[in-house]
Amino acid sequence: MKDYALIEAFQAGDEFAFVGIYNRYKGAVYAFCCKMLVDSEQAQDVTQETFLRIYENRDRLLKSSSFKSWLFTIARNQCLNSLRRSKRHTGFDVNLESSLPAMETPYSKMEKNEQVRFVTQFIQSLKPEYREVLILREYQNLTYEEIAAVTRSSISAVKSRLFKARRKLGKVMEPMWVLEYPSAVEKDRGKKVAVLRQQN
Amino acid sequence: MPDNPNTSDTQGAACSLDGSDVLHRYLDGELSLDVQPELFEHMADCEGCRRLMESVLAFRRMSRQEYLAYPPAADDVFFERLAQLKTRTEQVDREEDRKPLWNSRRSISLRSALALASIVFLIGLLVPMPARTDYATALIQFEVERVQFEPTDLVVIESPIYHWVDGITVEATRADSQVPRETF
Ligand SMILES: [Zn+2]
């Protein structure tokens, strides 16, 4: 069954269609919440809350053009509420690097769990307004326009936040690349690799 | 990390794309094909941009290493919560059933109400056919805009009276007259 048929049936009061929508989207919503909240238990609760709201507010969907945008708008607001409630607003400034551990392993040598940990720590180091944009783009594959709709901001604001988050990522990962391609590193970069190697 | 090499600091001056979003748009599949060769040409000479792109692509690969499966136990909790929500909704509906028809906010009741209205028209009134159809359509549109399904907040209060059209007067709850609340 196609998405729109499922959604139409759901709005017409078909309970099975709602279960279908839930099963189809719960994974994406859960992944989004996990990354936003960095807490799987809270993410489960917020995922459930999101779908309960979808169920309750199905009549409002008529006005919304994209179900996915609507879904993530609700999920996003629930996440922000949850962060506010638990006062875990602890994202650091986008320019701050102290929250991340020094990268001493070249990317290609990182174990799977190290990679997961790095990603989690990086996301956690972002303030919610940067975090949500990066997650919606890199995990949920939403367009700039969809992200703007979900986060109630302009496309240019979305781009500015997304690119800033990525530039921070580039900075944080730079040492990894230096270790990754030591032969390609020229001049003063060579010294930095040497320093990092000594530290190891 | 005082020794952290810094791409934008060391390369910033040399990079002609500094401050441009071309690279990001390429990464997001939003850069048109005819501009792409220019970008690649630039990247051949600009280590900073190459690294930034590599970083984003590596981040993408790394972020796919983690499979976040929604636990089956959480499904059980969800359907439990959904059942509770429905029970609450049904209770409200049953109360509403004892009240005049228009108190109900379910689309099914709207249909019955419209049917009733049509019957009244057919029997008693000499309204021309097209006018009646338009009116029904308008009613549906109005209802679509107005309905907000929030049973937890719903309190049935002493109702104001809506005068719809000659011969039909209906009651509405106070909640009906409110503009849908922005809940998030
Ligand atoms: Zn460049």
Image (cartoon, coloured by chain):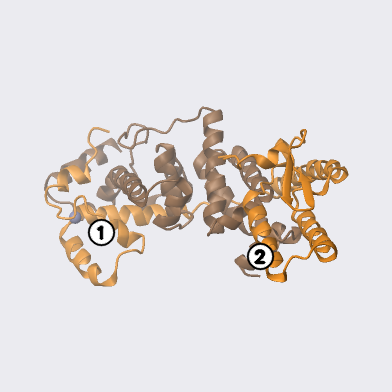
Chain colours: A brown, B orange
**Amino acid type, callout 2:** Asp
Q: Is residue A75 or residue B99 the one in the foreground?
A: B99
Quadrant housing the N terminus of chain A: bottom right
User: Which residue lies under the disc numbered 2?
Assistant: B134
Q: Is residue B182 or residue B177 the one in the foreground?
A: B177
Q: Are marks 2 and 1 on the same chain?
A: yes
> In this view of the protein, can residue A141 be seen by the observer?
yes
How many discs appear? 2
- Chain for disc number 1: B
Residue at left 23%, top 68%?
A: B35
| Residue extending furthest toward the right | B98
Q: Which mark is residue B22?
A: 1
- Tell me the SS state at disc 2: helix
Which quadrant of the picture is home to ligand 1?
Answer: bottom left
**Amino acid type, callout 1:** Val
Q: Nearer the viewer, mark 2 or mark 1?
A: 2
Task: Say if A88 sits above or below B146 in the image.
Answer: above
Residue at left 48%, top 47%?
A: A113
Residue A164: image location, x then y, percent: 31, 45
Residue at left 36%, top 60%?
A: B28
Residue B172: image location, x then y, percent: 74, 42
Specify whether tag 2 is near ligand 1 (CB below 8 Å): no
- Among numbered discs 2 and 1, the one appearing first in the sequence: 1
Task: Say if A192 sits above or below A16 in the image.
Answer: above
Which quarter of the picture shows residue A105?
top left
- Chain for disc number 2: B
Task: Say if A16 sits above or below B55 in the image.
Answer: below
For this view, does A124 lie left or right of residue A73?
A: left
For this view, does A127 lie left or right of residue B104?
A: left
| Residue extending furthest toward the top | A87
For this view, does A164 lie left or right of residue B164?
A: left
